[in-house]
């Protein structure tokens, strides 16, 4: 594995499948993500003192975390939320061929 690459998953929620796909397409096309998986979720949270229960779309963005600042900036540019969830989790172990594929896809 390339030691300069730190693989990870960035979690982002979006308000609609269209918004999720817009973000996913932009990240993949810009070679900031190797793959983005999108799943429907149901979120319960407090925002501005009010409890919300919402249908959202969870993006699982597979990337090189060295690119996190650029990934975050692109997500903020395209996202409708005032404070979007943008959380990076490190991959501590993974299939070497899959990690190599991520490395090849993320420019």
Image (cartoon, rainbow, N blue to C red):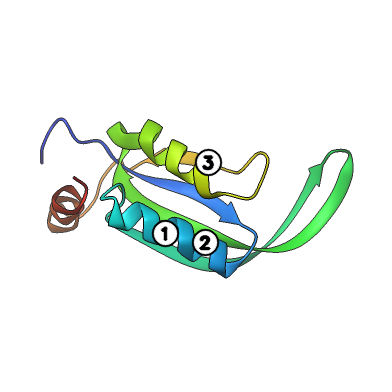
Q: Are marks 2 and 1 in contact (CB under 8 Å)?
A: yes
Tally the marks. Answer: 3
Q: Residue at position x 29%, y 50% from top?
A: 30
Is label 3 in a helix, a strand or a loop? helix
Q: Residue furthest right?
A: 50
Percent from the top left, x then y, of residue 50? 89, 45
Is label 1 in a helix, a strand or a loop? helix
Q: Name the quadrant of the C terminus.
A: top left
Q: Which residue is mark 3?
A: 76
Q: Which residue is mark 1?
A: 24
Q: Residue at position x 63%, y 50% from top?
A: 80
Is label 2 in a helix, a strand or a loop? helix
How packed mark 3 is, by other alpha carbons closer than 10 Å (few <14, some 14-19, many 20 or more), is some
Is 102 left, or right, of 81 in this rendering?
Answer: left
- Which quarter of the picture shows residue 16? bottom right
Q: Which residue is mark 2?
A: 20
């Amino acid at each position: 594995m390339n030691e300069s690459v730190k693989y990870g998953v960035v979690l982002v929620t979006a308000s609609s499948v269209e918004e999720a796909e817009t973000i996913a397409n932009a990240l993949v096309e810009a070679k900031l993500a190797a793959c983005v998986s999108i799943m429907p979720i149901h979120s319960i949270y407090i925002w501005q003192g009010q409890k919300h229960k919402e249908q959202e779309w969870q993006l699982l963005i597979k990337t090189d975390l060295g690119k996190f600042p650029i990934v975050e900036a692109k997500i903020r540019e395209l996202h409708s939320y005032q404070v979007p969830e943008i959380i990076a989790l490190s991959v501590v172990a993974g299939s070497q061929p899959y990690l190599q594929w991520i490395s090849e896809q993320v420019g």
